[in-house]
Amino acid sequence: GEDVEQSLFLSVREGDSSVINCTYTDSSSTYLYWYKQEPGAGLQLLTYIFSNMDMKQDQRLTVLLNKKDKHLSLRIADTQTGDSAIYFCAETGFNKFYFGSGTKLNVKP
Amino acid sequence: KAGVTQTPRYLIKTRGQQVTLSCSPISGHRSVSWYQQTPGQGLQFLFEYFSETQRNKGNFPGRFSGRQFSNSRSEMNVSTLELGDSALYLCASSKLAPTTNTGELFFGEGSRLTVL
C-alpha cells in the first residue's frame, strides 16, 4: 500500500473537464479516497468510493475505479478557478492511510 | 464544532535543536495520526495513536517520536533536527480507526517547520 502514484501537475482551462489519475497497490483497501488541499490549509475529504463500486458521481465529481488495474480517477466537470488545489488519492491499510504525492491542478481563466 | 488545532503554525529552528508540535483533535475523536508533507516526497505517514497507544509507525528514524494523552491530544517531537526535516507537519483525527469507518480524516492546518 505504500506506492500510491499520481502525476504531479495538471493544467486546464476554466470550464473544461479535469481528470486526475492515480494508481494504488493494496487491493484489500475497503475504501479509496480523494482529498483536496487548498493553499495554506490541511487536507479535506472530497469524496470516497467503496471498493466494490466501479463509479461514484457526486455533483461535478465522478470517481472511477478499475480494481483489475488498481487505477482510480477523479473527474471534475466544468472546472472552476476555485478548484485550483492539490488533489491526493489515498488508500488505507492497517490503521494508516497511504497518500499519493498529490496532483497540483492549475485552472486557467 | 471546533476543528483539529495544531500549534505552533510556524516555527524556525536550527540544526541540532529539538522541536515539539501539538495537536488537539476534534472532540470525541480518539485516533490521531501525523504526516510529514514535503514538495518532493508528498505526504508521508509518521505514526498513529488510538487511546494513548501507538498502533502504527511509518518509516522514519527514531528522532521522530510522539505520544497521545488521555484527552486524545497528541504531541510529536523531533530531536537533533536536520535540514531535511523542514516540512509541513499535518495532524489528522478520526472518530474510529481509519479502516473501520469511511475513512474521513479531519486535518489540521499544519505546523510549518523550517530548519536552518
Image (cartoon, rainbow, N blue to C red):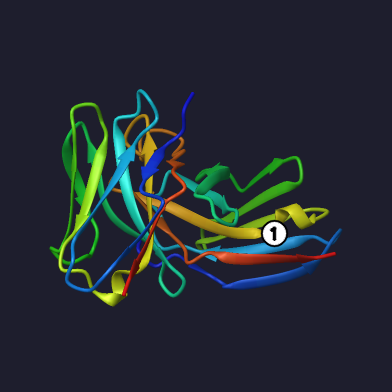
Report the number of discs: 1
At 29% from the left and 76% from the top, the residue drawn is B83
Circle 1 residues within 10 Å: few <14, some 14–19, many ≥20: many
- Residue, x 44% and y 65% (percent of image)? A4
Q: Nearer the viewer, residue A25 or B27?
A: B27
Q: Quarter of the image holding residue A79? A: bottom right
Q: Looking at the image, can residue B43 be seen?
A: no
Where does the N terminus of chain A fall, quadrant-wise?
A: bottom left
Between B50 and A1, the one lying in front of the other is B50
Quarter where residue A44 is shown = top right
Task: Please give left or right for residue A18 compared with residue A24 in the image.
Answer: right
| Left or right: A105 in relation to B40 | right
Expressed as whole percent of the image width and height from the top left, the position of residue B8 reads 36, 49
Mark 1: amino acid = Ser
Residue A5, given in percent of the width and then of the height, sits at: 48, 69
Residue at the spot of label 1:
A84
Instruction: Report the side of B79 relative to B104 (left or right).
Output: left
Q: Disc 1 on helix, strand or loop?
A: loop
- Quadrant containing the C terminus of chain A in the rendered view: bottom right
Relative to A24, say whether B66 is above or below: above
Q: Chain of mark 1?
A: A
Instruction: Write the residue at 79% across / 60% down.
Output: A17
When the figure is inspected, residue B16 is found, relative to residue B24, above or below; the finding is below
Give residue B94's position: percent from left, percent from top. Answer: 38, 35
Between A71 and B66, the one lying in front of the other is B66
Q: Position of residue B98 (x, y in %)?
A: 36, 39
